[in-house]
Image (cartoon, rainbow, N blue to C red):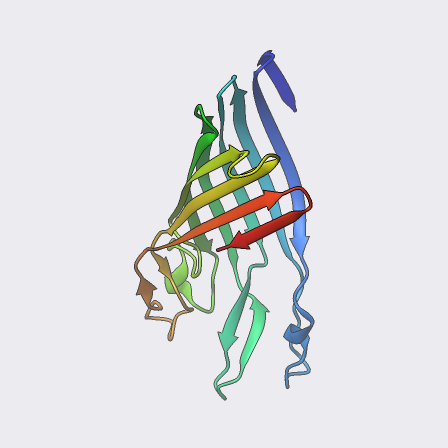
Amino acid sequence: ANYHVQNNWAFYAQYAQGFLVPDVSAFNVNNPGHGIIPQESTNYQFGTVYSASNLSFDGDIYYIDFKHKLQTQTLPNGDQIETNNGDATMEGFEVEGTYVFPHGFSAFANYGQIIAVAKNDSVFPINNGQQLAGAPRWTAAGGLRSETHDLGVAESKLVLNLTGHWTGSQVVNTPTTTLQRGGQIDGYADFNFSGTYSWKNYSLQGQ
């Protein structure tokens, strides 16, 4: 559902249901009684989108309910299998925007916060109420872009991009026992710089 407050400003709401089929390798285990079913999800999202001459912005909040959560379980003999174990919820918000400056420059930024919590986990009950492994608590991104025309020769173009991505702290593995959580790593960042110089049908790219 989408409602336009003005020509350049709208609110929207979404509802969706989905499922994730386990990878075929999840069935290749030495356990004839092992059964696994698709993970199911129900999604709710509400947001807004705004655009002006030089600015575009959007933000949303969301809530996702997972059933039959897929995760790795270690058997007493040391084998690891994929299994359905408990449920989970994921909720948070995300905002992002882009602004175009004069002379071919533009900038963008993005930030999202994620609360992904396990529940009804009977194998590793210590997970219940805790952040899911592999789900960072927040992510962010930002970048600058420039575009210059007729640089050196006519009909040429130089595009430069500098982007950064930040990932918040996260649990990196499943619990070792029913009484001990897995390890955690701090947040980290990576950056990328790229440039493309083009003239007619030719281009030179570097990254």
Considering depth in this image, is 69 or 47 the residue closer to the camera? 47
Instruction: From the top left corner, tell me how far across and down residue 137 is, in percent.
Output: 38, 49
Vertical position of residue 199 compared to residue 150: above or below? below
Count the labels in the image: 0
Specify whether 55 is left or right of 84: left
Could one spot residue 182 in this view of the protein?
yes
Vertical position of residue 106 compared to residue 187: above or below? above
Instruction: From the top left corner, tell me how far across and down residue 18 is, in percent.
Output: 67, 48
Vertical position of residue 18 compared to residue 71: above or below? above
Specify whether 153 is left or right of 33: left
Instruction: From the top left corner, tell me how far across and down residue 102 is, in percent.
Output: 44, 23
Considering depth in this image, is 10 or 115 the residue closer to the camera? 10
* Residue farthest toward the front in the current orientation of the protein: 153
Q: Residue at x 65, y 65 (%)?
A: 22
Quadrant in which residue 64 is drawn: top right
Instruction: From the top left corner, tell me how far across and down residue 7 is, in percent.
Output: 60, 12
Could one spot residue 97 in this view of the protein?
no
* Residue farthest toward the top in the current orientation of the protein: 6
* Residue farthest toward the bottom in the current orientation of the protein: 77
Vertical position of residue 181 compared to residue 194: above or below? below
Considering depth in this image, is 36 or 48 the residue closer to the camera? 48
Q: Quadrant of the N terminus?
A: top right
Q: Residue at x 40, y 48 (%)?
A: 164
Specify whether 135 is left or right of 18: left
